Each structure stands twice: as C-alpha cells, then as structure tokens.
C-alpha cells in the first residue's frame, strides 16, 4: 500500500484529503506544518507528498527544497497544493523540485488522476534505482575479479609494486609482469576503450592470452612482435568495436637494457639519479596506433640503457586526465612532477602518489581506472 503524506495548516483541507485518499486505498498521514511534515517524511519515506504552498514558518517551496535534498527521499513525488495560477509561480515551484501541482479548489477526479500518475512515477523511479544498484553490484564484482587476476608485488631481483583503483563504471585497464626467463622481465599495461563489462572483458582476454602464451608464433622478447600479433588477433570489427592502447616492455637485468613498444598508450616514465633535486627523466614511447583499429598498423621497438637506482613508472591515462574546476585537465606534465617529488626506492611510495592524486580529484570516484606500476631497478 502506497503511503501519502499531506502537509497543510488548514484543518479542513487536511482532513478532506486524508479521508478522500484513504477511500482510494492509500495509507495517508497528515502534518499541520512544514517542520512536522519534514520530520514525518524522514521517518515514513512516503511515496508521495502533497504540501500546501502558503504556510506559516515554512512554506511549501521551502519544504520541497529540503525534501528534494535528501537522498533517502529521491523517489518521493512532491505535489504543491496552491491557488496561485501565474506562470512565474509555477516556474518557482518546478525550480524548487516540485513534480506536480494541485489547484485550489480541489477537483476530485483531477486529484485521483494526478495521484495515480505520481505513484506510477514513484514506482518507476524505485525500479530504476533497484536496477542501478544491481548493475553497480555487478560492476563491483567484475572489478574484484579483474583485481584478483592482477599480479602480486615482486621483491627480488627487481622490486615491483602497483596500484589499481577501478573507476565508478569500471574501465578497461589491465596489467601484468612476469619473468620470461631468469634474466628477462616482461611488463605491460593496457587500457581498452570505453567503460563497463564490454571494456573489461577484452582486457581480461588479452591478459589471459599473454599470461598463458596461447597465441602462436610470438617472440615475447620483442615487444613490437607482441603488439603486431595482438593487433591481428583483436581487430575491433570482431571485438564489439573495442580497441585498446598498450605499453609493453622487456627488461634485461644483466645488460640493463629496456626494450619497449607502445600502441597509442601514454609514455612510461624512467627516472634516474640518486639526487632527488637532480633527477633525469625519459618519456618512453614509440609511434603506433591502438591495437585493433587498423589491421595494417605498424609497430616498432625502441630501447634504452637503465642506470642503477632507476624507477620505471607505467600507467594509464586515468591517473592524470582529471577534470579540474573551470574545465581544465590536470594533465601529464603535472603528474610527472608529482612522480619526481615522490620518487624513491622505498616500498609503499605509490601510496603517497595515490593520495595526492585523490586530493587533486577532490576524493571523488575516478572517472577512469587508476592503474600505476612502479618498477624499481637497483
């Protein structure tokens, strides 16, 4: 049974609405002023409220604003009862959040029809909220599944730690690192276009294929060959129009040579030097279209020598593409400066970087996945 709350300082109107609506099969509660009505609304969470516009202490407009500001009453329909007929008055009511109006004197057939319509909207809103909660639960479970697939930190002979914070909608980030043999370490991070399960599933597929080395005829020591093979396998025409960016590198710990290739992905950042005030940094990136966009896309390798006591940072664009007040984006340059300020060999340094980025993001949920890998190369 739907619950309706009537707020009116006029006893006659209040009792008329109560008796009339009860005869229609509704559970009706009344309040004689705005403050009492708000308290009852908090307690009862009615499906519909009918509130007189002109009342002492709190007007109907003020009651409406307070009710509409309460998340727990987000599906409650709010009707203003008024004798005012001017368009400007109705505009004020709508701006305050009113869902409908009832005119004085009350015409009963109109009252019944508007109440039925309002309750239908309330039920639809509740159904949408239920579906939204189910979807959020499924996305949260999917994010936990992706998290469970990600690798554990490494300690020796190379130390690797990572941070993965899924966005509100779950993006398409995934990463992995593993030893190809005793001397060669492979590292990659990919980001599928879009959000939701349709973005997460291709990322998981790539991770599983690379981890199991199930794609034939790939030279895993040659990053460009890995990207070419992935581009052949994951053409977007056959992958729900999804493409992905990726950075893939292989580090030789004996020669200290890092070979890498990228496909439309942000550059990895290599920071070298013992003096925090005189760090050397390199942006490691090669030209190449995102994987899956064009079958004929070409990929090349690049390499660099890694000095002792260097840190390699690999990340997705979600760590720096953060909207700021005024419409600006925080950006890559600012993120690199943050890395340089927090660059050290201590385990757990990614925590301070994440905390700083969360502050820049005003502690809101990230709009895109936050994925950041730190590889410490002593």
Image: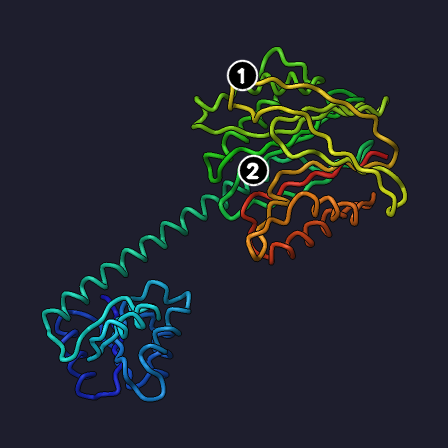
State which quadrant residue 74 falls in. bottom left
Q: Secondary structure at mark 1?
A: helix
The image shows residue 45, relative to residue 59, as above or below, that is above
State which quadrant residue 41 falls in. bottom left
Residue 271, position as x, y percentages in the image: 80, 38
Of 137 and 103, nearer the camera is 103
The image shows residue 165, relative to residue 210, as above or below, that is below
Q: Secondary structure at mark 2?
A: helix
Of 90 and 223, nearer the camera is 90
Q: Are marks 1 and 2 in contact (CB under 8 Å)?
A: no
> If you read the primary sequence from the N terminus, does the residue marked by circle 1 or circle 2 appear first?
2
Left or right side of 298 for 132: left
Could you tell me which residue is drawn at 54 percent across and 16 percent down?
A: 232
Left or right side of 197 for 311: right
Q: Residues within 10 Å of mark 2 (few under 14, many from 20)?
A: many
Q: Which mark is residue 232?
A: 1
Report how far apart the C-alphas of labels 1 and 2 lie in the structure. Answer: 24 Å
Q: Which mark is residue 146?
A: 2
State which quadrant residue 154 falls in. top right
Residue 228, position as x, y percentages in the image: 60, 17
Residue 3, position as x, y percentages in the image: 26, 70
Could you tell me which residue is drawn at 29 percent across and 70 percent down?
A: 91
Image quadrant where one finds the C terminus: top right
Could you tell me which residue is drawn at 60 percent across and 17 percent down?
A: 298
Residue 303, position as x, y percentages in the image: 77, 23
Q: Which mark is residue 64?
A: none
Image quadrant where one finds the N terminus: bottom left
User: In front: mark 1 or mark 2?
Assistant: 1
């Amino acid at each position: 049974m739907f619950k309706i709350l009537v707020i009116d300082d006029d006893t006659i109107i209040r009792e008329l609405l109560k008796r009339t609506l009860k005869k229609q099969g509704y559970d009706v509660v009344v309040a004689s002023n705005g403050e009492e009505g708000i308290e009852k609304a908090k307690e009862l969470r009615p499906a519909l409220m009918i509130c007189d516009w002109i009342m002492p202490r709190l007007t109907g407009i003020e009651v409406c604003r307070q009710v509409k500001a309460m998340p727990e009453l987000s599906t409650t329909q709010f009707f203003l009862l008024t004798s005012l007929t001017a368009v400007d008055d109705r505009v004020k009511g709508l701006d305050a959040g009113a869902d409908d109006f009832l005119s004085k004197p009350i015409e009963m057939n109109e009252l019944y029809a508007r109440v039925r319509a309002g309750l239908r909207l309330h039920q639809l809103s509740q159904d949408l909220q239920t579906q939204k909660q189910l979807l959020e639960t499924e996305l949260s479970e999917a994010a936990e599944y992706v998290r469970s697939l990600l690798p554990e930190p490494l300690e020796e002979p190379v130390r690797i730690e990572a941070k993965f914070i899924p966005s509100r909608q779950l993006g398409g980030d995934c990463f992995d690192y593993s030893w190809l043999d005793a001397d060669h370490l492979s590292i990659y991070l990919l980001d599928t276009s879009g959000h939701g399960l349709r973005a997460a599933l291709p990322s998981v597929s790539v991770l599983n294929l690379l981890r199991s080395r199930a794609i034939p005829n790939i030279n895993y020591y040659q990053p460009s060959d890995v990207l070419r093979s992935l581009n052949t396998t994951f053409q977007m025409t056959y992958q729900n129009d999804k493409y992905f960016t990726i950075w893939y590198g292989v580090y030789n710990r004996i020669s200290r040579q890092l070979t890498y290739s990228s496909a439309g992905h942000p550059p990895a950042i290599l920071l070298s030097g013992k003096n925090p005030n005189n760090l050397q940094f390199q942006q490691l990136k090669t030209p190449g279209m995102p994987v899956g966009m064009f079958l004929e896309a070409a990929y090349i390798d690049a390499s660099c020598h890694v000095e002792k006591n260097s840190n390699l940072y690999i990340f997705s664009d979600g760590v720096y593409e953060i909207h700021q007040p005024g419409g600006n984006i925080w950006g890559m340059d600012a993120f690199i400066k943050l890395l340089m300020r927090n660059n050290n060999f201590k385990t757990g340094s990614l925590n301070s970087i994440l905390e700083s980025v969360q502050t820049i993001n005003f502690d809101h949920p990230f709009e895109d996945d936050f994925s950041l890998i730190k590889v410490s190369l002593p």
